[in-house]
Amino acid sequence: MWQRLRLRTPGKHQAVRVETRHRARLRRSPWLLVLCIPLALFLLLPLCAILLRASFPLLLSTLQQHEVLQAVTLSLVTASITTALTIVLGTPIAQLLAKHTFRGRTLLETLIEAPMVLPPAVAGVGLLLAFGRRGIWGSYLDALGVSLAFTQAAVVMAQLFVAAPFYVKSAVGGFLEIDQELEQAAALDGASSWQVFRYVTVPLALPALLGGAIMTWARALGEFGATILFAGNLPGRTQTMPLAIYMGFELELNVALTLALILLACSFSVLAITKGLLKLDVGR
Amino acid sequence: MRVSARHCWLWLALLLLSGCVVPVGPARSNAATRQHETILTVFAAASLTEAFGEIGKQFQVTSGTEVRFNFAGSQQLARQLAQGAPADVFASASIKEMADVIKAGVIVPGSEQVFAQNRLVVIFPSDNPGNIASLQDLARPGVKLDLAAEQVPAGQYSQQVLAKMAADAEFGTDFKANVNRNIVSFEENVKVVVTKVSLGEADAGIVYRSDITAAVKHQLGTLDIPEQYNQLAAYPIAPTKQPPAGAELAQRFVDYVVSAEGQAILERYNFETDVQR
């Protein structure tokens, strides 16, 4: 997604031109369209299958089950906490990466991007070995009476690990896009660096920041691998929607189906919102 | 012009798609038969991982056939089989999952036989951070108890064992409630319980006796569950109705598992094999 956000850099005139050029070409390249069909169909069919198998009454009756409701609530709450944490902890890093050159910059950038390509199970093992009760750093926490594994804090940590990069990448793109002269002008007029950031940088980069935050939220909502390894699977405490789908698939398909439908709806609305934000930005 | 062009794409698309679909059938089955001449696919309960790994090796030595295993929770395997996953043999950790697969029409009723039995045991990390000295300790506030999920046989057996203890006045009236409060996670298969306890993340767990393998023996302490509370897990095995590797080969593997040689291997891995067949 961050790539899309970055692509928007050219601004509205160029963006519009790109769009018309694409349309003109499409008519003259039927083969391109044909070649697009297999993958598009492949992506579409499983989603259709979920929609076709689910029914509204089923959705309603399953949603009334205590464990299902617990999973939905837990997922929404933890994903939101994760997103808030990501904004607080990720924005400084995004600003650093966008505005400064320093030794180790590439290293930091790679570190931020790594979780996007790492299998979440790796994140889970790593978190357990680092922050588990007998983990390298977790053992010190344990001595202080803090135990993270099997708690909701562990759920948030797992989500933070895999989902934070989406926001940071998007924010870096947003910050890079800002005309530096605007920030310099504000500074010349006597604004402190915090004021420049608060009243110039953030408002100008807002669509990218919001888009990134929403992507992070969605990714956190879907987190599975790191969660089941590090936070465990206890209904009401650490069993999020994806975990309930996995366990429900083995016990009760209806639960899996209902939760899958909710996550599907979430993903689609998230993409629709971010695309809406992009348009808003381009149209400005 | 535009309309015909559009139709043209449609036909092209259809052509391409049918082109994709048609040759796949025969090509795939060719590859399948060629492959299955040498490879036997066995779906086996996660608790059989080590024992069947050894049995597979020995079977390959005696028969020259390579055995590939799909180890997972029996419930997961049962579902995969019912959905048509290609397998030659199914070895389940519970009669129930075998029955499900028979009901799905994948295995012929009556072709299954119990080849081993297993008992449950309480495990704890070897330095025993939860001070587990008796079964009653499982209910002590603050103990972190890790169990297999009810979806898998080990989880069902664990719940039955806990229920039997709770029914005994010796354990007190609120044993069940206290134990439930101590549960930190329901794992997707029993091996995850072993891992989390041996890592020291949980204070105690309930697993099969056969899960105390050489690899984890030194990291774990065990507490036997007396006969009157314990649950005997019966492991049934059967060839599938239409084994891709052939009925004869599938039966040969089953025969090997119940042979003296196969049973000796299972016993080495802490299974009980004095089963009436």
Image (cartoon, coloured by chain):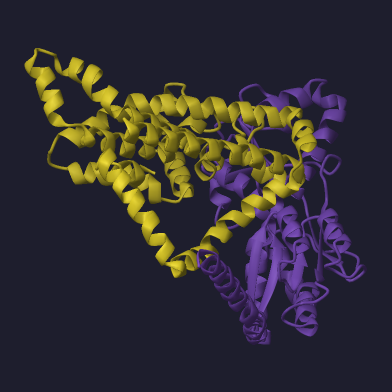
Residue at the location (66% across, 51% down)?
A: A48
Chain that is coloured yellow in the picture: A
Residue at the location (11% across, 28% down)?
A: A181
Badge count: 0
Q: Nearer the viewer, residue B115 or A198?
A: A198
| Residue A156 visible in image | yes
**What hue represents chain B?**
purple
Q: Is residue B212 left or right of residue B95?
A: left
Q: Residue lying at the far right in this picture: please name it.
A: B110
Q: Nearer the viewer, residue B119 or A263?
A: A263
Measured as percent of width and height from the top left, residue B187 is found at 64, 43
Establish if B59 lies above or below A187: below
Q: Is residue A61 left or right of residue B211?
A: right
Q: Quadrant of residue B90?
A: bottom right
* On-image quarter of the C terminus of chain B: bottom right
Measured as percent of width and height from the top left, residue B186 is found at 66, 39
Establish if A275 lies above or below B170: below
